Image (cartoon, grey):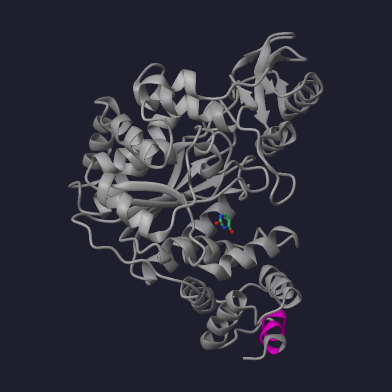
Amino acid sequence: MIPARLIATIRDGGTPPAADLAEFAAGLASGAVSDAQAGAFAMAVLLKGLSEEGRIALTRGMRDSGRVMTWDLPGPVVDKHSTGGIGDSVSLLLAPALIACGAYVPMISGRGLGHTGGTLDKLEAIPGLRTQLTEADIQAQLRYCGGAIVAATADLAPADRRLYAIRDVTGTVESIDLITASILSKKLAAGLEALVLDVKCGSGAFMKTPERAEALARSLVAVAQGAGCMTSALITDMSQPLATAAGNALEVIEVMETLTGTSVNTALWDLTVALGGEVLAMAGLAADVADGEARIAQALEGGAAADMFGRMVARQGGPSDFVERWPDRLPAAPVVAEVPALEDGHVVAIDGEALGFAVVGLGGGRRREGDRINPSVGLSDLAGLGEEAGVGVPLALVHAATEDAAAEAVRAVQAAYRIGPGEVEELPLVMKRIG
Ligand code: URA
């Protein structure tokens, strides 16, 4: 395989041989492919696309660029993956709920990306908690408490780690072929038997239209199933934040309120139940999706999911009394400011991407790779679509490190909300199922 020739073939609309794509993926991991070649490859794929065969070959090549995990456990190994949104902390509810229902969950998660929040950053808002475990630690933790929410180990899909960093800085993130290969190379390397995908659609997602979201969902499901992993996808609404907080510790608070029943967030609950029902049915732990949904709801309601969450947190180095004492254990920002609405009417549109970048601006996400995150900052009490708004009435609360940062975030949130007359047609949370 000659990288320049492979790139030129894609640039000219052709499909390179599968073996060459696999070799290119191996070259990304070994360093045989240069940064310039990786960037040119990503741009050629974004502009011209790969055939389905090419997409499968690239995904498999990236999966096989590192270790593929295998398991010897008495139950099915499952996971879910979200394509990324705002106020979406479902993973923290779903992993323990699935474990409580008899599944094993090696949840290999990511950090915030662009305007979207990342599960690892949220979890690390819990003092002492570690997400960088070795494969041996992950294996031991699954045997001990059924699941782990962790970062990819150094040798899991290394081709993706390299290509992802290059895509992030070359304007080549939004390619369906590359997103498919990126997500699935990691998920398939985790040795899953069943996977549910939450493909977000709307202003806070990478896929802004139902057509693009459906194309991504179909691509992900086809490639994952083709690789032998039972997979379905739900296309879900991201035209507004999923829950009412965006920011790491603030989202953990909403998770704990929902897990412990002190104040249940309906959207978080409903999406956790819908995604969990899919996984349990595919994995044979429920008779069908409806039965799976009932089991997940019971795990949440009866406190089993909260117990499992506590065990995972403690095992990963967090406080052993987190489920009982979470209000005392999470960091809080020193400045809390209201975001007053500037008009009367109803919330008719929310720019989710702008809200996500407001959190990044507060220090809750990274401007550059390697930036340190402030876990305490973010937004809470976010008004939803259709909600009545009045001049001076708060649309949200900003949690900031300084008064200046708060003032800037207040302006950003005000600009992200469109308030107008009339009714808003709210989309269903689950827009479509593919599988
Ligand atoms: N998440 C990933 O892991 N990769 C992508 O390309 C997009 C979202």
Residue situated in front as seen by the camera: 334 or 236: 334
Residue 434 appears anywhere in the view: no
Quadrant position of residue 160? bottom right
Q: Is residue 409 left or right of residue 296?
A: right
- Residue under the point 53% across and 67% down: 181
**Which quarter of the rendered picture does the N terminus lie within?**
bottom right
Give above or below for 293 relative to 177.
above
Number of callouts: 0
**Main secondary structure found in the magenta portion:** helix
Q: Where does residue 42 sit, x and y in percent of width and height?
A: 68, 70
Q: Is residue 142 left or right of residue 200?
A: left
Q: Which residues are magenta?
A: 5-12
- Residue under the point 38% across and 71% down: 227
Q: Where does residue 312 sit, x and y in percent of width and height?
A: 36, 40
Residue situated in front as seen by the camera: 44 or 59: 59
Give above or below for 321 relative to 61.
above
Q: Where does residue 300 sit, x and y in percent of width and height?
A: 30, 30
Give above or below for 133 relative to 190.
above
Quadrant position of residue 35? bottom right
Q: Examine the structure image and report whether residue 215 is included in the region drawn in magenta.
A: no
Residue situated in front as seen by the camera: 15 or 186: 186
- Residue under the point 32% across and 66% down: 70
Residue 144 appears anywhere in the view: yes
**Which quarter of the rendered picture does the C terminus lie within?**
bottom left
Q: Is residue 174 left or right of residue 136?
A: right
Q: Quadrant of ligand 1?
A: bottom right
Q: Where does residue 10 sit, x and y in percent of width and height?
A: 67, 81
